[in-house]
Image (cartoon, rainbow, N blue to C red):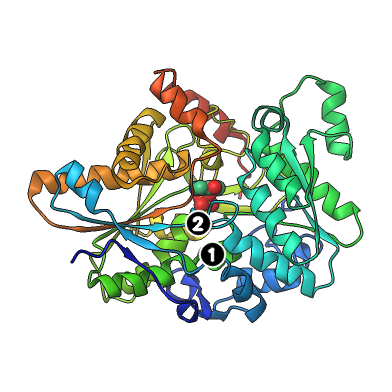
Amino acid sequence: MRQYKYVLDEKDLPTHWYNIVADMKEPPPPYRHPVTLDLLKPEDLAPVFPQALIEQEASRERWIEIPDEVLDVLKMWRPSPLYRAYRWEKALDTPARIYYKWEGVSPPGSHKPNTAVAQAYYAKKEGLVGFATETGAGQWGSALCFATNLFGLKCKVFMVTISYHQKPYRRIAMETWGGEVVPSPSTETKVGRDILARDPETTGSLGIAISEALEYALTHEGYKYSLGSVVNFVLLHQTVIGLEARKQMEMAGDYPDIIIGCAGGGSNAAGLIYPFLKDRLTGEKPNLRAIFVESTACPSMTRGIYAYDWGDTAKTGPVVKMHTVGHSFIPAPVHAGGLRYHGMAPTICALLNQGEVEARAYHQNAVLEAAEGFARAEGFIVAPETAHAVRAAYDEAMACRESGESKVILFNASGHGHFDLGAYDAFHRRELPDYELEDERIREALKDLPRI
Ligand SMILES: *Cc1c(COP(=O)(O)O)cnc(C)c1O
């Protein structure tokens, strides 16, 4: 009898998060101050993030205990299932054995609440009133509103104006969970008012929304700022994905040759990959391949440079060493909004630089074509971001068909695409552009990197 899915009990939930920094040969270089460019001190971050998260950000401990209160909430949907894609393997006529971890089962529909819940818990414990944050299409904002509501906190979300008007469903979800959502730029912050005075018709950007959220958090008593990707503590919280998947792969009697995740800031991919990559870093599985997949519209790992850059467009956040296409780079409006970040998580970049992991990029038609094939075989309609991981799994499965090898491929299915069906519609109508990004645009954006 074939087994299609591997399901763990609640008691099998990981009790600790895994911190990859403990096993890296060389951890990423330290953060720097956005204005002075000197080394960043923990107290510089104190007004911005809850204290416990600042400690996790700098931690070198291999295992960090997950508080019971966090586990209690994660149990609403975790452990998440792991599937063997028998039907897709058959459709692709490949000898590869393909597995995927399904994060679309969380109430907001993606991996993002894995960290939103932990962050809300620490904020509550510290006695905060609420969080301010930014959101593009609303995936991060909805995860944070879901989490803050459960801990009795407020959530103020600055949502990029164009998405606020064009993509109302996640805004409605945020409001349903008790969040307060305003289009950004707004009149509620100085940054927002200044931008509106100069350009009343602006459609907004993620960079502006970050600046507004930061200003709001710093000027409102009891508020701090929450971030949904890139930094160490977010990647740490996401390792529940890979820790569960390890147990599930064991149940299946397989171990991956290739692990794949899509990467915007890198959190869902690292969440699946890091607990396995541990085996490569410690020499147990030297041939394990890990692939981070980005969008050709924002190719930080495949066409950017490895350098210090500001994490946000307005240059208010820390300066970090990462693969970047420049903090002033504005990517084309691809449907995978979650992959439109100019940089990448510093630990992923350090591992890429050390040759421990791989990166690749795809155009949106190629990823939606693979995602449609996946949906027809496996049923799940994945988010456009997730579709990038699906495409990479497809290409690796096809390589197996060529070579006749029966490799084990595991990818993270980071979220469902039920609010992003417009992307599939545009693909069906052949109206989905594949943006060709000229080198000149990247060169231009790389001109304003900090000199360190
Ligand atoms: C936000 C998002 C991503 C990209 O973010 P990472 O931090 O790189 O994981 C990927 N998939 C889905 C479904 C998302 O919502």
The answer to which quarter of the image holds residue 102 is: bottom left
Percent coordinates x, y for residue 115 in the rendering: 61, 62
Q: Which residue is mark 1?
A: 77
Lower sequence index among marks 2 and 1: 1
**What is the three-letter code of the residue carrying label 2?**
Val
Percent coordinates x, y for residue 407 in the rendering: 17, 58
Residue 2 lies left or right of residue 383; in this view the side is: left
Secondary structure beneath label 2:
loop
Up/down of 151 relative to 158, above or below: below
Q: Is mark 1 within 8 Å of ligand 1?
A: no
Residue at x 30%, y 37% (from the top left corner):
373
**What is the three-letter code of the residue carrying label 1?**
Trp
Residue at x 54%, y 64% (from the top left corner):
77
The answer to which quarter of the image holds residue 236 is: bottom right
The answer to whether residue 429 shows anywhere in this view is: yes
Residue 168 lies left or right of residue 214; in this view the side is: left
Up/down of 33 relative to 195, above or below: below
Residue at x 56%, y 38% (from the top left corner):
419
Q: Are marks 2 and 1 in contact (CB under 8 Å)?
A: yes
The answer to whether residue 300 shows anywhere in this view is: no
Residue 353 lies left or right of residue 309; in this view the side is: left
Q: Which residue is mark 2?
A: 105
Percent coordinates x, y for residue 282 in the rendering: 33, 76
Percent coordinates x, y for residue 421 in the rendering: 50, 33
Q: Disc 2 to disc 1, how far (Cα)? A: 6 Å
The number of numbered discs placed on residues in the rendered structure image is 2
Secondary structure beneath label 1:
loop
Quadrant containing the N terminus is bottom left
